[in-house]
Amino acid sequence: MSATTAPPRAPGAIGASTGAGTSTLRRALAISPETTTGLGLTLALAAVTALGRVVVPLAVQQTVDEGLLAEGGVDTARVALTTAGAALVVLLTGLLSYRVTVRVFRATEAGLATLRAKAFDHVHRLAVLTQNSERRGALVSRVTSDVDTISTFLQTGGIVLLLSLGQLGVAVTLMLVLSWQLGLLVLACYLPLVLAMRPLQRRAARRYAGVRERYGDVLAAVSESVVGADTIRAHAASARTWRRVDGAVQDHRRSAVRAQVATATTSALGLATTGLVLVAVVVGGTLLGLDGGITLGRLLAFVFIVNLVTQPFLALTEVLNELQNALAGWRRVLGVLDTPVSVADPGDDGVDLPPGPVAVDVEGVTFRYPGVDEAGRERAPVLRGVDLHVEAGARVAVVGETGSGKTTLTRLVTRLVDPDEGRVLLSGVDARRLREASLHRRVVVVPQEGFLFDTTVGENVRFGRQGATTADARRALDELGLGDWVDALPAGIETEVGQLGERLSAGERQLVALARAHLAGPDLLVLDEATSSVDPATEVRLQRALAGLLLGRTSVAIAHRLSTAEAADLVVVVDDGRIVEVGTSEELARAGGPYARLHDAWTAQHR
């Protein structure tokens, strides 16, 4: 077992780019194609529904001109027949509108389910560094509330958009048929608003994008404050925290108000235009009627038709504003899906990790975290030209000052990140060639704070291996000597641990995490000093469990305690991004180097 130090190499560039595409809507629908399933039939039904809505104005014209004002007096039969026919068509139109709504709901729910699943899956495939570059609350908002915004638009505004466009097209055509003069007058009144819509929508789009961003900030601030409530209270920081949360809320409020002002402007212009249109039609229709250019029935029908134009036109202005909010949500979700997976699974092109305890070789590895420092310069490498060999079955302790690079070294070994230069070999295979399923089945990490799900002790242990039973979980606990501990819990192995395991002590959470790792049956175990935050009484039980867990396995542990380093076969000392010492604890303690200073500090703490 040896380590050598190589000269520093030029750091590899890490970057991420996102491509918006030429059309957000087109890309979004392509990602969730179920949204457009059966769209042709849905559009056809919507068109028929739009045709059905012009029956009432036509019935009014026929009733007045051919029934009430018929030559020779009122034609009662014509009036009754026209009225009955119109009522039947209205009923059928209502049924068709119901079918359109149901079809839109089914298609959009299927498409949104696919979008949610793809976004959630992609988030989990992103590297830890990519996830940490954005606050978790904001990331959650992209997968949840932003998709909900899209859902609201598709299932309300989408239906209105379909029906309104169809109704608008049919109504404009009929207006020109009934009276081309009044039809052109109506179109002329609407022309200024149509020309103003594009800049108004652009402004609304910018403001709704800001709303989605600010909502993510609110969710991030609130979730962080809830999770860290104990720390906040312990440091009397409630007022400061409230100011930070309130600041995020107020920023969202101001952003939302600006967006609503943009919406209100469009709506107000639309209402003013519709009022102008009605006045113009009444005046123009009266003048035409005096000259005999239009009958009373046609004029009344035209007034009804104008309502069929103004109603969907106003609805479209509202829908277009909602569309800007939905597009802002779509862009944020697409931003997640466009984020490249820097640690990619080779899939079918990869290989499985060979069976048995894992040997680890780090060869010429240089790694820097992405981004820039406070001065705007590219960050310096955290590890530079690192070489290390760990034999299969060895117990290795990695020690070093805070920020020395020891955590980064373990991240590279477990392939949570990839090196910029050099390579990491596991049992002689480049980690980048290993299939993700094989790697994470054989290489297991036990963090310093074992994460527990809000379920029972047994379920948390079973999470270590797919398909494991409660009996398997119990067996894993017994093999680590934890049977008496779990039996002493209020409900034994069925004890609920609470959110993040809050009903258990820190040491008990680590016991569950160790049992979960044992059930997984890894050949390489990486521990971030899993015994560093426990009480003395639990430490004895933990050490016994660890001894059983490490038996026959390769292990790499970040050591914060002297006992961990002394129990290791090999101690690796990391300092300023380089491995500066390798050897047994006893050898390095006598060498007078960095480890000796750490050893003396540990010893002094326990005198």
Image: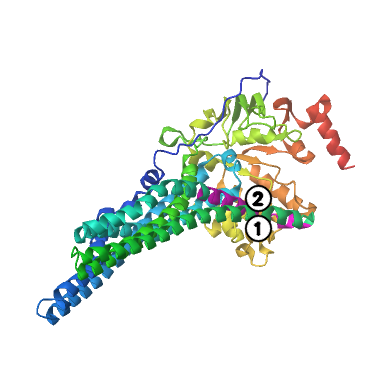
Look at the image and tell me in which quarter the N terminus lies. top right
Region rendered in magenta: 208-233
Relative to 164, is 539 above or below?
A: above
Query: What residue is shown with label 1?
Result: 501
Q: Residue at x 48, y 55 (%)?
A: 265
Q: What residue is rendered at 64% in x and 27% in y?
A: 378
Amino acid at pointer 2: Gly
* Picture coordinates of residue 180, whole percent (x, y): 22, 56
Residue 482 appears anywhere in the view = no
**Nearer to me, 284 or 13:** 284
Q: Amino acid at mark 1?
A: Gly
Disc 1 vs disc 2: Cβ atoms closer than 8 Å? yes
Query: Taken as a whole, is the magenta stretch helix, strand or loop?
Result: helix
Q: What residue is shown at x 12% (from left), y 80% (from top)?
A: 75
Q: Which residue corresponds to mark 2?
A: 450
276 vs 131: above or below: below
The quadrant holding residue 503 is: bottom right
Measured from the top left, where is residue 228 in percent x and y? 70, 54
Taking the image as drawn, is residue 153 in sight? yes
Instruction: Name the spot of residue 557 as percent of width and height, x first.
Output: 68, 38
Q: Is residue 226 magenta?
A: yes
Q: Determine whether 428 is above or below 564 in the image.
A: above
Q: Foreground: 492 or 312?
A: 312
Label 1 residue SS: helix
Residue 93 painted magenta: no
Q: Earlier in the sequence, mark 1 or mark 2?
A: 2
The one nearer the camera, 149 or 250, is 250
